[in-house]
Amino acid sequence: MNLQSLIRGVIVKVFQMLVSAPAGFTRELYEISEVAGHLLCCITLYKPEIYTQLRLSSEFRLKDLLISGLLSRGSAVTREFFQRVIYFLCENVRDLSVPLSQSPLFDLLGGMLDVKVFSSEQECGEACEVLLTSLETYKHIATFDSGKVKEMGELMDPIKKLGEVMNSIKGYQARESVDAPDTDKGLLGLLRLAEKLVSMQGYLAEVPAPLRNEAIDEVAFRCLFPLRKAIGDEAYSFKCKSQQSREAAFKLLESLVDFDETSMLSVLSDCLLSLPEHLDEPAVWDYTPEKAKRAACGYVGMRNLGCICYMNSMMQQLFMVPPFRSAMLSVKDNVLPSVDNPLRIDDNMLHQLQCIFGYLAFSTRQEFNPQRFCFAFKDSDNKPTNTSLQQDAHEFLNILFDRLERSLKPTPYARLVQSIFGGKICNQLVCSQCGTVKRNYEDMYTLSLEIKNQRNFHEAMDKFVANSPVSGYFCEACRNKVEVSKRTLLAGLPNILIVHLQRFTYNYDLGVNEKIHTKFEFPNTLNMLQYTEEGAASSGKQHAAEKKGGSEDEKETAFVTESDSSREESHEEGYYAYKLVGVVVHNGNAEGGHYYSYINTNRGENEGAEGYLNTESDPWLEFNDTVVKEFDFKRVPTECFGGAVEEYGPSLMQDIGDAAGANRSRSAYMLFYERKAKSQIPESSHGAESRAPVVMHDFHRLPMNVVEEIKTVCVPLSVTARDNSKWSRTMRSSCMRSWCSRGASARISGPSSPR
């Protein structure tokens, strides 16, 4: 068997098997491929004309096979293998009997330039490295061997190829995110390829002014920075969001303006000089822009201006309720901004709440400063919120709901708060003689439970609905003073059930407030049927049936009246089923402390799916003012139940971090439960324009006053701030080099063309 037959019969077939192999191919195939690769390299190195013969063969297209392997989607190992083979062929194999353009270097270079190797659907990192290395060799030869320039120019026109690459960049759908550190290798390859082609000017050809200006606009305003007046999707359409791709784009921009004073000054005036207008002055001396961007989990924190952690923790909980967030970002009260104050701040609480939600939804910064909301949210003396005064989170929520309802009353969202968070409680008086039930209904936004001397949620609820005797009550049905049983039941369940745990009490003996640190457990899921009117009626019937035939006293205590029985309503099982979606924790004592939230982020999705109530399997986050990070739900008992350290066992004492014998200072204060089968929001509070949910970057439905407020942060200033100093150094260096080398610039680049 001759060498050519060996390549055709063995090596090529092994390569074909490797290209078509799945990601998990066997180790034997990989070892055989390694041997085949070594054989090909040795044979072509020994007889370079073998490659020329294979290149001209119509039966075995070695070039196409190598490029296909380099772009294989099966495995990174496969692509790295073909990368090594191509490197060796390009660097070491040279058939002197044929023109340079037919050597492996330029044969493979031309093949890769002809194929659209950079796309979001292909893995092109290895192809990028090979192509860039080949172009570097191409540039090197053009520099030191002027006799080959014409020959190479026939193979590839760098200016034409630069135009094609820039068109590819313009139409490229980048897959990078501000929150994720992953780099789009296709975008990175295009930027690096364009920079390499631009750097060839002065050796092979000059970049024409129209192409240069178009490339500068694309790189500066669509890859690095969006247009300053952009809003919505346009503000997020800049392509380069990872550190690697932005560095490549900066390098490309520097090459484009290098030795072109007019272009450089235009970029400086359009981009760099306007940046300070959109950047806040750093609040700390060791300001690090990289640390000031949105958390990797994709959510924005809130700055604590002193003692407003109670506000921050509740705002994050409300923001994570999808229908409430959607409505807040959509409602228009048609009230002009009230800026009749020395600070020129819109003194409208609803507008400022919308701004908070707008920032939390669309900002790429690490945190939002709620100082404007604090100014608009007045206290009982009609003064701005005192940010140095610690307040109760439950009290703040009640005041916020009350003011929201007043603000939303003239809008189509008048019943928004009631339809999402509102339920009803029924206070009943049951006559012990005739069984007549007198009812009084009240609206409920939070379910406040007394937890003193209670071990868990169900014990607290049993106490909440327990009967208490009242003597001397005049029954209108009996026309006599009788003893009645007083009880409280739930008459209507909200979509979002907010439970307030009464951990703060007043000690009348000592005359001070105290915090209850005892352990209080709450479940991951709830079935609220037994605490409702219909549940009580159903259990009353069963109790009456069980007591049938008993003593007269038992019969008297086991009654169900016709009016009580008629209160039963038919609801599906999911109506009473809730899962835990949020916990507000208080860490401290009655005199002061700190609030923060744990929140389930799997909201508004898969509600009808089996396992929806398994909240422990959902992703959870901790929102602690500025810090937003992942939270392990398994830590809920140790972080939220409170109680003495010893109650959690010796295995957890070290993780808890509290001293033995002491009560835990951190414990749950408010619980958020989400119902599985939610009630529809009435049309009067929902509005036709809000039926579609507001999603991230959905700016077109925002009120204009909110748009104007959040416009500055729609631009990813955390990224621009990070790049500001780098860009300043880059442009300053280019500027100095250009102005100090005007003579050289004229000789090398010719006269500058106006942009």
Image: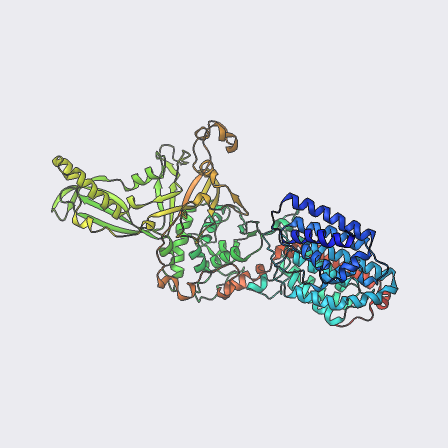
Q: Is residue 341 above or below residue 389?
A: below
Task: Name the spot of residue 514 as percent of width and height, x first.
Answer: 41, 36
**Residue 307 % position (x, y):** 50, 45
Asked if one can make out residue 128 in the rendered structure from this viewpoint, the answer is yes
Above or below residue 721? Residue 411 is below
Image position, residue 539 (x, y; %): 23, 43
Front one among 208 and 354: 208
Q: Position of residue 300 (x, y in %)?
A: 54, 52
Query: Which image quarter is the C terminus in?
Result: bottom right
Q: For the view shown, which residue lies furthest in the front direction? A: 1
Nearer to me, 132 or 653: 132
Kindly indicate the quadrant of the structure image that contains residue 469: top left
Q: How many marks?
A: 0
Please tell me which residue lies in front, 307 or 727.
Answer: 727
Q: Residue at x 76, y 48 (%)?
A: 39
Left or right, 497 with respect to 440, comes to: right
